[in-house]
Amino acid sequence: MRPLRSLLFVPGHRGTWVEKAVASDADAVILDLEDSVPAHLKEQARQEVVRSAARLRAAGSPVAVYVRLNSLESGLPGDDLEVVAVEGVDGFMLPKTYGVEDVVRFDGLVTHFERRNGVAPQTFEFIVSLETAEAYADCDNIARAPRVVTLFAGVARDGDVSRSIGFQFTPGGLETIYLRSRALLATRAAGLEFPLCGLWQDLSDKEGARAFALQNRDLGFRGQVLIHPSHVELVNGIYSPSASEIEFYDGMIKAFEAAVGDGAAAITYEGMHVDYAHVKTAREILDYSRRLTENVARQTDTAPSADRSPAGRVSQDAQTSV
């Protein structure tokens, strides 16, 4: 999985919103077939998702494209995959799972429709949305399941997960620190690099959105799922190493390498003790920054001509729920 700082939900039946979502500079779009699509528009949404993915592919867009399927308990993911398991889609977000067995069932369905639709085996990867108490309890196994590239710790107010677990949402997030930390640890322990969190639902509270993103970055998350393009710029900045951080770690590496040349393996750098462990972290941060820069460059080179204002002129109605 490549670095994804911002993943923006777009209701699958709202095809005209896709280019505007891409123009917001989101690293990925999640074309939704589940909670943001009325039951009578599911088939229309599937067809629109295929058209949207095809347009982005034809335009050479580097933005990652995921599709949130309907849940297994709905009986609809087979109908979804028959239509949307096509070239141009990078993978699927799996909703309302209850354990690793559900991921295995999704894998069986996807394997079938890859073959049936003429798509190369193992084309599609999974982002698993943790929305039930059972999923959080089994997240260690889920993270190691077939096709899984990351876990999404969704802790939205009044959503499926708050109902399943029973927490009362607060802006400070103390009530979900354990849940988010458990998901993050499971993701990293499985060797997966980019744990995801979300959602921030109060579109009028920019300071709350900033505090939420900063807290999650400090915990160790690498990206965030969003419901509105006005949050993309904020989130991209928070989950990117700053210029001062890059300068600090670059200087650390140079100072340490000079010390090693003189026979030392521990130094004081800007008042901080530094040895090999710290330099390994510094190298990882600089490598991550380089990968992000390459992604941004690709997006800039192929940016569509749609309105690139932060809000993208998309309606501020909530687009989805978790």
Image (cartoon, rainbow, N blue to C red):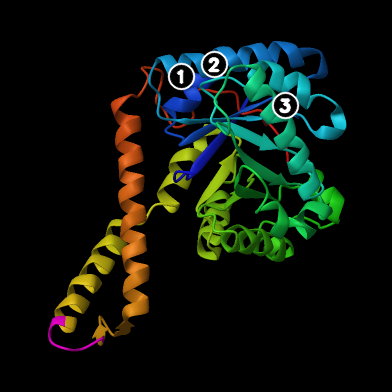
Label 3 SS: loop
Label 2 SS: helix
Label 1 SS: helix
Q: Residue at x 24, y 63 (%)?
A: 247
Whether residue 68 is visible to the viewer of this picture, yes or no, is yes
In the drawing, what numbered circle is on residue 36?
3
Residue 220 image offset from top left, x and y in percent: 53, 62
Task: Give the spatial CA distance, label 3 vs label 1.
Answer: 21 Å
Task: Give the spatial CA distance, label 2 vs label 3.
Answer: 16 Å
Q: From what the image shows, is residue 69 above or below residue 198?
A: above
Residue 9 image offset from top left, x and y in percent: 60, 32
Task: Give the spatial CA distance, label 2 vs label 1.
Answer: 6 Å
Quarter the C terminus occupies: top right
Q: Report the predominant secondary structure element of the magenta stretch.
A: loop
In this view of the protein, which residue sits in the foreground, 158 or 142? 142
Residue 267 image offset from top left, x and y in percent: 25, 86
In this picture, residue 98 sits left or right of residue 235:
right
Tell me whether the residue at label 2 lies in contact with that at label 1, contact meaning CB atoms closer than 8 angstroms: yes
In the drawing, what numbered circle is on residue 21?
none
**Three-letter code, disc 3:** Ser
Badge nearest the viewer, 2 or 3? 2
Residue denoted by label 2: 52
Q: Residue at x 86, y 50 (%)?
A: 164
Residue 170, picture quadrant: bottom right
Residue denoted by label 1: 56
**Three-letter code, disc 1:** Leu
Q: Is residue 172 magenta?
A: no
Residue 129, picture quadrant: top right
How packed is label 2: few (under 14 Cα within 10 Å), some, or many (20 or more)? many
Magenta-tinted stretch: 261-265
Residue 238 image offset from top left, x and y in percent: 44, 52
Q: Is residue 263 magenta?
A: yes
